[in-house]
Image: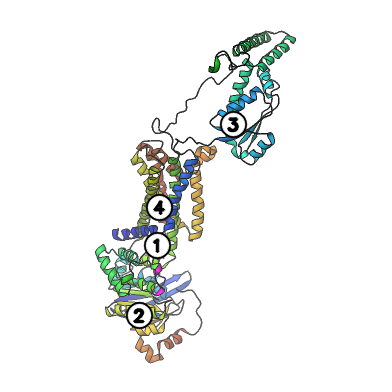
Amino acid sequence: MLQVDRLTKRYGERVAVNAISFNIAQGETVGLLGPNGAGKTTAISMISGISRPDGGEVRLGGMSLTEDAAALKRRVGLVPQDLALYEELSAWANLQLFGGLYGLGAAQLKSRAEAALALVGLADRGADRVKTFSGGMKRRLNIAGALLHEPDLILLDEPTVGVDPQSRNAIFDNLEELKRRGKTLLYTTHYMEEAERLCDRVLILDHGQILADETVAHFKERYTNLEAAFMQLTGRGLRDGAET
Amino acid sequence: MNGTAIGALIRNDLRLYLADRRALIVGVLVPILIAGFFGYVFGGTGRSEDQGKIPVAVVDEDRSEVSRAITADLSADPLLQVSALERSAARDQVKSGKQSAAAVFPRGFGERTTRSLFSGVNKPQVELLVDPSQTTSARVIEGLLAQYSMKEISKEAFSGASGRKAIDGYLEQLDKLEQTPLRSDLRTLLNAARKLNEQSSADAGPDGTGAAGADGGGQRNFGLSIPYTVASTEVTARDNTPYNSYSHSFAGMAVQFILFAGIDAGVLLLLTRQRGIWQRLRSAPITRGEFIVARALATTLIGLFQMTAIYVVAILVFKVRIEGSWPGFIAVVISVCLLNAAFGLMLATLGRNASTTRGLAMMVTLLLVMIGGAWVPAFVFPRWLQNVSSYVPTRWAIDGLDGATWRGLPFAAALTPSLLLIGGAAACLTVAIWRFRWEE
């Protein structure tokens, strides 16, 4: 379904993403793992159409991002790492904006927003201002915002960062429900247990390059567990650079 | 164009504006309060009796009939509020700002002025102690002092005792000099003046009240006065429609605070860039053009809401009237709002961070509104600044609004300011489109 071919991004002399290539099949959940500064967010930005690649190509269902970005964007839902919400507005108002950006009419938007809020467990909080929500509720609403246009591919950039275990568990339930509905997920995280629980396949990225592309079962078989594989492939040195 | 997306963006910006109570207060309530204050200070609706008198002290060290009469005339003038003080007290009050000026009549003022009226020499000096921060008031006082002095001194010369004495003294001096045709003519003139003085005194009677009574005929009333009267007519939209200074103050403050809203819109865009919401916007199937159009329209609508709210209060409470063309007024208002929206977008594309951009933009805006005549009318500016002012968009906006309100001008008069404002909007928008960073 998603084909990423030799995707490259440079910032001046520095190569943030260096000719990465991978495919994701329909309904598959893929984890994109890497230490800080590995190039995960840059890769997600390019696939979602936010950032223009310096080289390579992204295709979704045969559609090229370069040739028809608007059509491809309609099939992709992005859950950014930073909360993409207006805290001064209600959850409903936020969803009305996000649905409107994808051309949803009033009736369609209402039913989809209700469904999205129900999925993330916020059906009774739609009229409340986002600033009254807990961190976990905001994270769940952040996910709901990416579902309104019913995308085929959902890109999740560290969707559980900064939330308590209960909220993380709730978010996981939401993502597993999406998986059951046949959505394709590309998921970046630092938490190995999340990837083990959710992902069918894991890509390990470091210094802008893909070091491994295997199923979770394969990693477990070869390295005991995913964390051992991660540490062995990326090394034990600290990564204090900026997140890219 | 994706109309649904543009509509969603506009609706969202309006929601954000209405959700921010601070923006509502700053954008609507504050300009009304400030415009109300300025309008009141500069004369209000023009119907008030309390127009603010100029405080002036009079120090009468002469205590002559002339100095007392001048003091009485000054006290009766509707522009002045006169206090009789001693010199030291008068100086202190001018220094402390309680009096705009103090006029000091020196000893011998009355006698010397009537004499020097004919001789032109040995003139006494009236000392005017002036508050340097109120020079305009001092000029008014100086003018009124000259007017009333001329009246009372000439009156004394042609009908008073000291005037007769002064004429006699001057005639005596002439007798001692060599006779020339000019001096002969002067002697004839002085003799005629003396005769007039004697006649006036005789008519006034020993008690000075005059045979003709209080109507003034024949008493110590004969003197020089300004040989014309002035009928001042306020040239406003229609005859008998007084000038309403709230019209100008509301125009100025509405323009100023609309520009502040434009700054807020620009800063909001800069802040949005720094938040996750920007990634969500960028990942949506909207184009750069659609985003810019939506932002411009939303800011224009917010400006129109502010303008409407401000002028509704101006009309209902402060009796501001659209005496001229309603379409002209609407054209100017829409043009101002378009310019403001483009100005906000331009700021967002030129600024690097929110706080610096807000500070710089506020400074520029305050300069523009000052030069544009929003605070004080442009006529008080030096000539060069008036010339600069005519190139400033805020001046076009205020002139356009003044024209449609109290000046009562037709639609044609609103066209030039409207077109200039739209031209300014186009220029700002061009810069905004050119510099707007959408791709990363």
Residue bounds of the magenta highlight: A131-136
Nearest the eye: B80 or B360: B80
Answer with mark 3 or mark 4, whichever residue precedes in sequence: 3
Distance of label 4 from label 2 (alpha carbons): 43 Å
The disc placed on residue B141 is: 3
Disc 2 target residue: A172
Q: Position of residue A204 (x, y in %)?
A: 40, 82
The secondary structure that most of the magenta stretch takes on is helix
Three-letter code for the amino acid on which mark 2 is drawn? Phe
Q: Nearer the viewer, mark 1 or mark 3?
A: 3
Q: Position of residue B79 (x, y in %)?
A: 54, 32
- Whether residue B297 is situated above or below residue A31 in the rendered picture: above
Disc 2 element: helix
Three-letter code for the amino acid on which mark 1 is drawn? Trp
Disc 4 element: helix
Disc 4 target residue: B341
